[in-house]
Amino acid sequence: GTSMFFVLAGSLLYRPGGYARESVLDHSDRLLRCNTGEFCCEIALWFDWCHLGLMTAVAPTEIAVVDVSNCDTNFLRENASAENVLRSYALAFQHAMQEPHSYPSDLIHDISYNDLMFALPVVSRIALSRPLFDQIGVDSSRIRTPMLSNTQVAQLEAEVAEGKTMVGIAGNEMVRVILVVVLRIYLLGPGVGPPPLEGGSEIL
């Protein structure tokens, strides 16, 4: 396959083949649905991909198709900034799919897009955030954006530029994402810990 599909209206049902990871799921499982506002088969844009199942419409459905085989590379050559962002995203996606715990699929439920976006260079995150910032305060915007003052917008832009946060879209709403790292530290009891060295000194 060479295409990614966006469901603009309606609903699709995925029928996994024998080699698909989803073949163990019941046919009524929500993970096999691709509903309005969702998408599938992004992997076909970045890899030589053979589909592992069949997607069928289970309601009157309208979809938008991105077909990489019809990509106009001249546009990218003439827009270096867009090419750099696309290249960095493609590399991040490929690295994510090659992780030991990843499960490449026609569906996208195993992809952590938050992790994927944080893997991008800061300059790419800034470029992807710019169109969203431009929608703040626009009455005709199709995206629900927060009510922010100019000072708050500038602060949020600075946080993105410093790599502290990023902004994206969840459904039809603009969201702010922060990466949180949690560590659990254990205090070792008496007699528990690394053995002393032969000279009597302890390992630090």
Image (tube, rainbow, N blue to C red):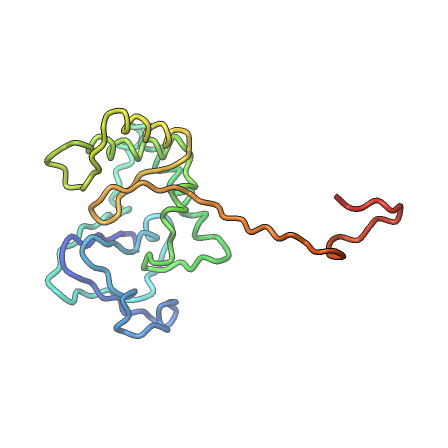
Q: Given the current orientation, which residue lies at the most extreme front position?
A: 190
- Left or right: 74 in relation to 58: right
As drawn, 56 above or below 171: below
Tell whether 67 sits left or right of 50: left
Q: Nearer the viewer, residue 161 or 101?
A: 161
Image point (36%, 60%), residue name: 105
The N terminus is located in which quarter? bottom left
Q: Which x, y percent locates residue 49?
A: 36, 56
Furthest-right residue in view?
Answer: 199
| Residue pictured at 84% horizontal, 48% vertical | 197
Q: Which residue is at 35% across, 53% downward?
A: 43
- Counting the numbered discs, the total is 0
Task: Where is residue 16? Give x, y as percent.
Answer: 31, 69
| Depth check, front residue: 179 or 8 | 179
Image quadrant of residue 201? Answer: top right
Image check: 21 left or right of 73?
Answer: right
Query: In which quadrant of the rendered view does residue 79 lie?
Result: top left
Of residues 15 and 122, the one drawn nearer to the viewer in this rendering: 122
Residue 153 quadrant: top left
Quadrant where the image shows the C terminus: top right
Q: Position of residue 132 (x, y in %)?
A: 24, 35
- In front: 97, or 114? 114
Which residue occupies 39% across, 69% down?
19
Percent coordinates x, y for residue 51 in the rendering: 32, 61
Above or below, 94 relative to 192: above
